[in-house]
Image (tube, rainbow, N blue to C red):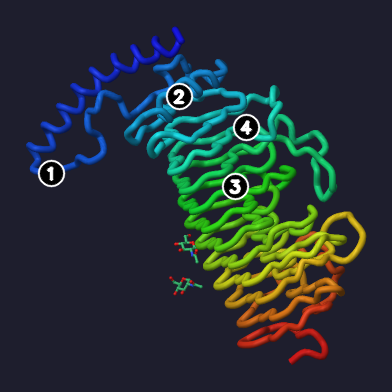
Amino acid sequence: MANARMLAAKANNTNIGSFIIMALVLGSCVANGEYLGGGRELTGNPTVFDITQFGAVGDGRTNTFKAFLKAWIQVCASPVPATLLVPKGNFLAGPIIFAGPCKSKVTVNVQGTISATTSGFATPEWILFERVDNVHLTGPGIIHGRGEAIWGADGCGKKFKCNLPPTSLKFRNIVNLEVSGISSVNAKAFHMFLVKTVNVNIHNIKIIAPAESPNTDGIHLSNADNVRILDSFIGTGDDCVSVGRGSNNVTVERVVCGPGHGLSVGSLGKYPNEEDVSGIHFKNCTMRNTDNGLRIKSWGGSTPSKAVDIHFEDIIMENVKNPIIIDQNYGSRGGESRVAISDVLFKGVKGTTITKDFVQFMCSKSVPCKGVVVDDVKLSFVGHKGGHPSASGGLIGSLCNNAGVVFGGRVNFPLCPNQK
Ligand SMILES: *[C@@H]1O[C@H](CO)[C@@H](O)[C@H](O)[C@H]1NC(C)=O
Ligand SMILES: *[C@@H]1O[C@H](CO)[C@@H](O)[C@H](O)[C@H]1NC(C)=O
């Protein structure tokens, strides 16, 4: 209680300062004959809460998570749109939870760097936004996971049961999320994980980790609807984008991916009774030196579900291994996958590959892939670059196991036998 009162007193002091600044700003706007107002009325609450006003020190050594929480309480309780500001500096922090619901729209503006502690994680995430609607995380600052300190330990790979190190940024149970301008560097495992989020706009972000960093997916979606990921750069050690169970209406556009394991739908069918996936569209993306290109993957021995309307269009590839692949035997578990895949389009794919099996469709015997179209795919083989075996083991051309594939347009490699 005493704490809350002290904070309120502090906030009021700040407000006098901002009142004077606002007066000056408004004065100069009028002088210039411009109107820059809107949303920053002086209602008795400051709208920007700087974490250094709550005790944070940006020296890279002091754990500042308490300052984040104190500032967040003010931001989230604000009746008008409010901003949590991380100014220039290096702010070390253990697990942070930005929990809602909040009273108004909230922004977290990162100008400096937030660095993760290297131990002390009881939770599967480092920074969690939970039940905060109308939230905007923006930059140009850096979210630094400091994964390099723990990557040496055993990764999870395709193991079925395994607790991953914490995700850098998790968003869960959110409606209306925007993420822009930030860079996520060296996450301990996933950089960004969206769970049960609706109406998401991610744009102009950077995701960076070395090719050999384990399980560092760029952006992973699970039960996410109406998602756009645009104009971003993702170079990491696992999938650049992976669209998982129960996700619908997802567009990934003008994303540059590499290094990494490519743009993926899946892995699907890992857990019992997964929700269907539909309307996943990747457009105008560039893949550089990735371990896979465009991929759909599902686990063997799964319960039934569907993955429909998955399009990859206008994609440029440079030195990509396994450029186009559907792998329904993903993961170390026996039995057939029962994830039914249909209406899949690969159109306008060009560039270079380091494996000669340009197209690999390894679909399930019990639910063969339906309506797969490969149209205008022109890829040149540029050498093995140190001998990379492909997923299906070095055939030349295309493989269509349990898949009805229609090839159209200009395609410059041998097609599956017994197909058009
Ligand atoms: C798909 O998502 C976009 C936002 O990314 C939204 O504008 C559009 O209305 C959604 N479509 C459907 C059918 O929900
Ligand atoms: C890719 O970008 C080009 C140029 O802006 C545009 O003409 C084309 O329609 C885009 N492709 C898709 C699938 O949106």
Instruction: State the residue position of label 3.
Output: 194
Location of mark 4 (residue): 126
**Residue furthest toward the right?**
334
Kindly indicate the quadrant of the structure image that contains residue 16.
Answer: top left
The amino acid type found where label 3 is placed reads: Leu
Instruction: Please tell me whether mark 4 or mark 2 is closer to you in this view.
Output: 2
Q: CA distance from mark 2 to mark 1?
A: 34 Å
**What is the C-alpha distance between the residues marked 4 and 2?**
18 Å
Q: For disc 3, does the CB lie below 8 Å from ligand 1?
A: no
Which residue is drawn at the image coordinates 55% and 37% (left, top)? 130
| Mark 4 neighbour class, 10 Å CA radius: few under 14, some 14 to 19, many 20 or more | many
Residues at marks 3 and 2, CA–CA distance in whole angstroms: 23 Å
Which amino acid lies under the numbered mark 4 shown in the image of this protein? Trp
Which residue: 82% across, 90% down?
A: 418
Give the number of the mark in front: 2 or 1: 2
Query: How far across and how far down the image is residue 368, in percent?
Result: 80, 76
Labels 4 & 3 near each other (Cβ < 8 A):
no
Q: Earlier in the sequence, mark 3 or mark 2?
A: 2
User: Which residue sits at x=57%, y=72%?
Assistant: 313
**Residue 387 can be seen in this image:** no
Residues marked 3 and 1 touching at CB (< 8 Å): no
Residue under numbered circle 1: 34
Q: Is residue 276 rendered to the left or right of residue 106? A: right
Specify which label sits upstream in the sequence, 4 or 2.
2
Instruction: Say which element carries label 1.
Output: loop
Q: Earlier in the sequence, mark 4 or mark 3?
A: 4
**Observer-nearest of 375 and 370:** 370
